[in-house]
Image (tube, grey):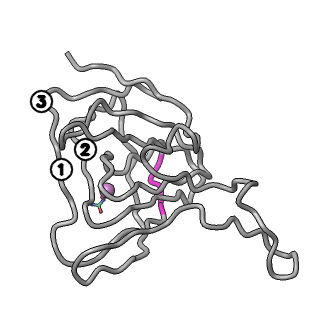
Amino acid sequence: MAEKLTIQPLTKEAFAPFGSVIETDPAAMRYINGGTTERYNALAVAEAVGEDAKVIINIFRGSPRSFPYAVGMMERHPFGSQSFSPIDNRPWLVVVAQDEGGKPGRPQVFLAGGRQGVNYGRNVWHHPLIAMGAVSDFLVVDRLGGGNNVIEHFFDTPFVIEQP
Ligand SMILES: NC(=O)N[C@@H](O)C(=O)O
Ligand code: NI
């Protein structure tokens, strides 16, 4: 029987074990350009290590997932971080897990607002992009380089996310 996963709101504090939240945090803001621009500074740090490693900027166009949704696998990127920032101002889901002996533990699900992005730290277990409601574009900053940068784990029994 698939275990149901609860959904919690995405906050900087709750997400801290997994990475950073990319949002207009007043604590990170300073005025630049003669006061015409608010700079929300250093919300996350992109990391790229290993052979020929580069930080790259991408757009992912995610098709909406249908619910109830089965979380059957998680992945991690050993050579770099990976960030997702929504372009279409639509809520989406972030699914992460702590590492337990080299495998993901019980997934944790966060509901991200349309103006909230995340940066998964290097090697953090996460589920691939889960867009909701309509085809949604995300600005993605991650790593290009040598070696295999994706490790996947498939659960013996999927977990399930009911309709958010
Ligand atoms: N495959 C790919 O680049 N995407 C995944 O890493 C993901 O987290 O969506
Ligand atoms: Ni990924």
* Amino acid found under the numbered disc labelled 3: Asp
Asked if residue 142 lies left or right of residue 7, the reply is left
Please give the name of the residue rendered at 23% of the width and 36% of the height, measured from the top-left corner: 100
Q: Which circle's residue, 1 or 2, is located before the other in the chain?
A: 2
Give the distance between the C-alpha atoms of the residues marked 3 and 2, in whole angstroms.
12 Å
Task: Name the disc covering residue 152, or none.
Answer: 1
Cβ of mark 3 under 8 Å from ligand 2: the answer is no
**Vertical arrangement, residue 20 with respect to residue 13, above or below:** below
Whole-percent x and y of residue 123? 29, 55
Check the picture and name the quadrant holding the N terminus. top left
What secondary structure do most residues of the magenta stretch adopt? strand
| Residue at which label 2 appears | 74
Q: Label 1 to label 2, Cα distance in Å?
A: 6 Å
Q: Amino acid at mark 1?
A: Glu
Q: Is residue 46 above or below residue 10?
A: below
Residue to which mark 3 is pinned: 156
Q: Nearer the viewer, residue 134 or 104?
A: 104
Q: Nearer the viewer, residue 156 or 86?
A: 156
Q: Which residues are magenta?
A: 134-138
